[in-house]
């Protein structure tokens, strides 16, 4: 009983703080006037349709972060954040020292864990759709 509560508290802790951090970083791109510079960076990585990929990455951080905080569509949000952080860590920062790329590694690790565990009991997914729901 206590162990179960602590596990769900731990998932809530990871979900809310990771979502808050991701949303903060996405906000600067989506609403903070940095999208043009971000899209230029995506273009320099060689992605086709860099504007589209830049918006997808920024929204995975901003909207996905908000979704993680509240635990609605949490596995989908975690998947998109995981994919975005995969690009950030393994492509964008591949040659950078660890102190530069460790934040993307942390988000990659936590979003991967949330993808596997789901949002936990204390989430809108659980409240709205019940314990058998798979987001």
Image (cartoon, grey):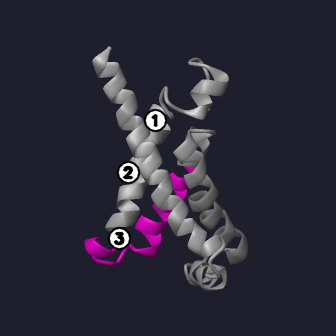
Q: Is residue 68 above or below residue 122?
A: below
Instruction: Residue 97 in the image: state x and y as whole percent.
Output: 27, 76
> What residue is shown with label 3?
101
Q: Which residues are magenta?
A: 79-101
Q: Which residue matches tag 1?
A: 116
Circle 2 packing at 10 Å, graded few (<14), some (14-19), many (20+), is some
Residue drawn at the location 41% of the way across and 56% of the way down: 107
Point out the image quarter for the N terminus. top left
Q: Residue at x 35, y 20 (%)?
A: 4
Nearest the eye: 76 or 66: 66
Left or right: 71 with respect to 53?
Answer: left
**Marks 1/2: CA–CA distance:** 11 Å
Q: Is residue 14 above or below residue 2?
A: below
Q: Earlier in the sequence, mark 2 or mark 3?
A: 3
Say which label, 1 or 3, has the lower sequence index: 3
Q: Residue visible at 61% across and 43% down? A: 76
Residue on which disc 2 sits: 109
- Tag 1: Cα neighbours inside 10 Å, few (<14), some, or many (≥20)? few
Secondary element at image label 3: helix
Please provide percent x and percent y for residue 70. 57, 42
Query: Alpha-carbon distance for marks 1 and 3?
Result: 23 Å
- Residue located 54% across and 46% down the image: 68
């Amino acid at each position: 009983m206590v162990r179960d509560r602590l596990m769900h508290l731990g998932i809530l802790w990871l979900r809310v703080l990771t979502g808050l951090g991701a949303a903060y970083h996405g906000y600067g791109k989506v609403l903070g006037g940095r999208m043009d510079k971000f899209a230029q960076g995506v273009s320099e990585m060689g992605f086709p349709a860099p504007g589209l990929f830049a918006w997808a990455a920024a929204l995975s951080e901003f909207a996905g972060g908000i979704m993680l905080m509240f635990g609605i569509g949490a596995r989908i949000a975690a998947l998109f954040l995981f994919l975005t952080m995969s690009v950030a860590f393994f492509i964008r920062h591949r040659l950078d020292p660890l102190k530069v790329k460790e934040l993307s590694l942390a988000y990659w690790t936590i979003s991967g864990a949330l993808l596997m565990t789901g949002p936990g009991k204390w989430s809108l997914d659980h409240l709205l759709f019940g314990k058998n729901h798979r987001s």
